[in-house]
Amino acid sequence: MKLEVRVPTLSDSVASGTLLPWHKQVGETVARDETLVDLETDKVILEIPAPASGTLVELRREEGAVVKAGEVVAVIETGENVVSPVAPGKSVPPVATAPVAPGAAIVSPVPSVPSVPLPAAPEAPVIPQGESRREPMSRLRSRVAERLVAAQHTAAMLTTFNEVNMAAVNELRQRYKTEFEVRHGVKLGYMSFFVRAVCAAMQQFPVVNAAIDGNDIVWRGDVDIGIAISSPRGLVVPILRRAQTLSSAEIEAAIADFARRARDAKLILEDLSGGSFSITNGGVFGSLLSTPILNPPQSAILGMHTIQERPVAENGQVVIRPMMYLALTYDHRLIDGRDAVQFLVAVKAALEAPDLLLPAP
């Protein structure tokens, strides 16, 4: 029996993808769920697996072809008496079903939820002195470049800064970390404090969660926060949906799950689509201060930075405190400077008096 291999269902924001080199060629045997080819989209690289074990008898589309969801790209012959087109008349023994490889998804011939390997950062080649090398940008990097330039051209981006004393958050984490982990099965990190502080500040300044759509302003009732997560294959920003309804434990568990699935290439496109606000933490890499770039159509993004002990003035005295610089980049077309500054001040105030952000476990 012949089975068609189709491009998996893509998200609303991804219309097509480009086929990368085929892992299998016509005449070769394949195992169910074995990756046949990778599909590079604007956001991620998707695996297209074999829907069944058998022999690859036809490649409908070649490397570099731009394909859409549902399009047939190959044909597999299944059954016990598969005839290879390379050696006519030669019987090919049946192929045993293989276990699912790491990062692969168990899918039907037209899968609705593809697995998502994350794109690796480009590896710099070794170039001899006096020489140069030219290579085309990948579809992903070209799209990223396009979006970054578009953000610069379409949004009136401005960044406001502040700093927060992290002593109170550190004290709460130290006090409750053991009990929190025992009760909820997840570690108490910094991100849940920042997510809840952002959600609290948005109750006062909902314009930070809004967006421009043509000549309209879209006001959102839910706070869907993109959390930048580093993985072995690159940086991804899965969406923490309805963050305003989540407890600290639910936030930490969701972020831990995102990190796990990013590492194992199990994120799906829906995890990476949408979002009304973003948080990025350059501090984990040692960044002291930066100006994050908007992710349109979002109107604001919060940048966290490294915690550094610094001398500060308190009640007329110089003391050493764990301080973090915060940066809020916002679209000045929609958000006035007053609202942006006061929003960041509200985030700072919540973090410096965090008892309400973390009810006792």
Image (cartoon, rainbow, N blue to C red):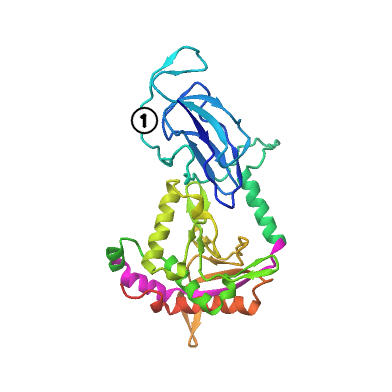
Q: Can you give x and y, in whole percent of width and height, for residue 74 in the image?
A: 54, 30
Picture quarter containing residue 182? bottom left
Picture quarter containing residue 360? bottom left
Q: From this viewpoint, is residue 310 visible? A: no
**Residue under circle 1?**
97
Q: Can you give x and y, in whole percent of width and height, for residue 238 in the image?
A: 49, 56
What quarter of the picture does the C terminus occupy?
A: bottom left
**Residue 272, above or below 356:** above
Magenta segment: 154-178
- Which residue occupies the foreground of this view, 248 or 15? 15
Q: At 43% across and 80% down in the image, what residue appears?
A: 353
Binning the other alpha carbons within 10 Å of mark 1 as few (below 14), some (14 to 19) or many (20 upward) gives some
Going by the picture, which residue comes out furthest to the right?
153
- Which residue occupies the foreground of this view, 180 or 222? 222
**Residue 188, above or below 230:** below
What quarter of the picture does the N terminus occupy?
A: top left
Q: At 53% across and 80% down in the image, what residue appears?
A: 204
Instruction: Please say whether residue 166 is one of the residues in the magenta stretch.
Output: yes
Going by the picture, which residue comes out furthest to the front?
1
Picture quarter containing residue 250? bottom left
Which amino acid type corresponds to the residue marked 1 in the rendered image? Thr
